[in-house]
């Protein structure tokens, strides 16, 4: 058996930990992440709980755990929705070609010119802050990313002999796309899902940092950092924990994506 | 196809995308709740005063007419008047650009200054210590949020070492020194994730070009290793690096909104964010369009640079 890529092992472990923490936080956290305890206000790590307490005495470790659920929930939903729409656009463009392809790719160009924070500002004006605004803003930006990748990958498959054979056999574009193109590009799509979920976590954190993410008291890493900034000189531990959580989560998903790519396409291992 | 026709077609495409983007922005802002006239006058205003202001602002004109008059105004540099600041939006934006443009320019220069040497060095000695450092830096750098780097810089450098300031902007009137000083930490925070991405791309591009036949030929002709690297490999590896720099612009702009917020810089990102919370939608509308314009124009320019950097691509669309 071939040895698994190191990045896959490390990335997989971190992602499993993140997922585990997110799921566990639904049934158990060391303390109630929303329970205030003024006596513990701004206490450091060890003095009150593993990672200390925040400005109203909530247990930081518990909020970080519960924040994993929020972060992963928003990022994963946005990525899956954006990825599904984008992939559909990409394989359609590759299958149809011509005007359909040009129009779809031009629409992509328009979407791509709206970075997540900008669409969030626009959507925030329309629907106010919240999980739905975050998911839509991040998902919209994922569409062109997946469309580009799946179109390029699908075009390579369309040029292959077995697809030519399928066409000779009289199969239509839709059938060939479902039977041959999608199964052959799914590895690349899954790699992107991992990497883009990482980017989604970064975007979600940014949006909640600006106050445009999930509404309080739902725990969120980005808002923890926004709160922490006020107490930065007196309670630096509040800045460290959520930031590290974001960085480790994104690192894990990126490594997982890289590892999956190495596993599914060994040629890339020498190239990158 | 002649070069001139091709350029004209590409500019036409750019304008079309921009027009669609402006329509999307306009319609979203139109659909947003909150009547500008009531916001300007406050909740206690009499209904006929509000109606009079609505008429004065032209808000009771048909939708299509207001869209066209917005576009017409943009062409003349008139973006309307801010609901909360009561000054022309264009002037407001210009003021704020004097902070955001230098900030992003410093971040781009810094990220290239880190990424090019690091990526080239890493590629030149694969699996050496610098290569390991570069790969750790590019993995970690992509994963850390820039606003968190900003907070850590405030904590470690501004509060810890007492270097630079924790935030705020003295204005260019205070002299170039203090003004640039206020932008150093924000620029570093903005640059690190960009540098991480660029390091990775530079390394991969240099390795790929170094394996090409013309580099082997150059070496066979007796060119030294470092001369072949800097004269032939690196210039040919620049194309993907420049492309990535262009693709990163949307992230740089998003990042600027966050980093300006951390360091309380009066930039365009802070303006958009504050305008949103004050429901000064005309400012939001124009700022978002400006950002979109910047993203599109930069991508357009990057596409154009292709043919300058790689003559093989000339004549293709």
Image (spheres, coloured by chain):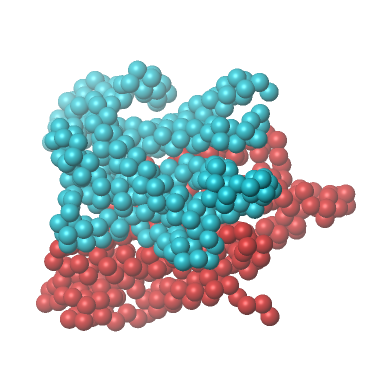
Chain colours: A red, B cyan
Identity of the residue drawn at 39% across and 33% down: B289
Q: Is residue A154 above or below residue B231?
A: below
Decide: is B37 above or below A46. above
* Residue A3 percent location from the top left of the image: 63, 77
- Asked if A41 appears above or below B175 in the picture, the reply is below
Q: Residue at x 35, y 81 (%)?
A: A28
Q: How many marks?
A: 0
Residue A18 pos. (x, y %): 43, 73
Asked which quadrant contains residue B214, the reply is top right
Direction from residue B201 to residue B102 in the image, left or right: left
In this orientation, does residue A115 appear? no
Residue A270 placement, left or right of B115: right
Towards the viewer: A163 or B69: A163
Find residue B112 and report its horizontal and vertical position in percent: 41, 46
Quarter of the image with the N terminus of chain A is bottom right
In this rendering, the answer to whether B110 lies above or below B289 is below
Residue visible at 42% across and 32% down? B293
Residue at the location (58% across, 32% down)? B307
The image quadrant where one finds the C terminus of chain A is: bottom right
B299 or B35: nearer the viewer: B299
Visible residue check, residue B108: yes
The furthest residue to the right: A169
Question: Residue B160: x and y, percent?
Answer: 17, 62
């Amino acid at each position: 058996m071939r040895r698994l890529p190191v990045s896959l092992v490390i990335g997989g472990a971190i992602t499993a930990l993140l997922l585990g923490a997110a799921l566990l936080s639904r049934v158990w956290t060391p303390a109630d992440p929303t329970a205030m305890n003024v006596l513990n206000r701004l206490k450091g790590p060890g003095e009150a709980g593993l990672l200390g307490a925040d400005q109203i005495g909530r247990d930081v470790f518990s909020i970080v755990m519960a924040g994993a659920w929020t972060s992963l929930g928003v990022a994963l939903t946005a990525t899956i929705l954006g990825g599904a729409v984008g992939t559909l656009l990409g394989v359609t463009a590759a299958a149809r070609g011509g005007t359909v392809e040009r129009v779809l790719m031009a629409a992509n160009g328009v979407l791509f010119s709206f970075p997540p924070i900008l669409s969030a500002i626009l959507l925030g004006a329309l629907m106010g802050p919240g999980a739905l605004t975050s998911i839509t803003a991040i998902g919209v930006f994922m569409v062109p990313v997946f469309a580009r990748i799946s179109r390029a990958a699908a075009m390579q498959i369309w040029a292959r002999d077995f697809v030519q054979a399928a066409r000779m056999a009289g199969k239509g574009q839709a059938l060939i796309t479902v039977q041959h193109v999608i199964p052959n590009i799914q590895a690349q799509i899954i790699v992107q899902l991992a990497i883009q979920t990482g980017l989604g976590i970064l975007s979600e954190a940014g949006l909640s940092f600006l106050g445009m993410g999930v509404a309080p008291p739902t725990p969120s890493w980005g808002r923890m950092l926004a709160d922490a900034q006020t107490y930065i000189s007196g309670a630096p531990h509040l800045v460290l924990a959520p930031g590290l959580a974001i960085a480790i989560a994104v690192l894990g998903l990126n490594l997982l994506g890289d590892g999956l790519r190495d596993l599914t396409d060994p040629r890339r291992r020498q190239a990158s | 196809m002649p070069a001139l026709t091709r350029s004209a077609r590409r500019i036409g495409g750019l304008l079309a995308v921009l027009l669609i983007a402006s329509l999307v922005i306009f319609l979203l802002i139109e659909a947003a709740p909150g009547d500008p006239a009531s916001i300007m006058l406050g909740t206690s205003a009499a209904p006929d005063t509000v109606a009079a202001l609505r008429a004065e602002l032209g808000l009771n004109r048909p939708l299509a007419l207001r869209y066209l008059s917005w576009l017409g105004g943009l062409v003349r540099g008139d973006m309307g008047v801010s609901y909360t600041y009561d000054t022309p939006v264009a002037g407001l934006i210009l003021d704020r650009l004097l902070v955001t443009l230098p900030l992003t320019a410093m971040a781009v220069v810094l990220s290239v200054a880190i990424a090019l040497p690091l990526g080239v060095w890493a590629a030149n000695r694969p699996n050496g210590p610098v290569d390991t450092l570069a790969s750790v830096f590019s993995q970690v750098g992509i994963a850390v949020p820039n606003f968190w780097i900003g907070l850590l810089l405030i904590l470690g450098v501004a509060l810890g070492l007492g270097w630079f300031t924790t935030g705020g902007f003295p204005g260019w009137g205070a002299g170039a020194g203090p003004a640039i000083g206020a932008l150093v930490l924000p620029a570093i925070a903005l640059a690190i994730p960009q540098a991480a991405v660029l390091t990775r791309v530079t390394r991969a591009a240099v390795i790929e070009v170094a394996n090409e036949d013309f580099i082997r030929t150059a070496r066979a002709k007796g060119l030294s290793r470092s001369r072949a690297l800097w004269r032939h490999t690196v210039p040919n590896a620049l194309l993907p690096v420049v492309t990535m720099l262009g693709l990163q612009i949307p992230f740089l702009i998003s990042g600027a909104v966050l980093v300006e917020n951390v360091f309380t810089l009066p930039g365009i990102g802070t303006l958009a964010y504050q305008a949103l919370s004050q429901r000064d939608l005309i400012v939001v509308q124009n700022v978002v369009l400006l950002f979109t314009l910047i993203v599109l124009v930069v991508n357009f320019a990057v596409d154009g640079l292709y043919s300058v950097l790689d003559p093989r691509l000339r004549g293709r669309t």
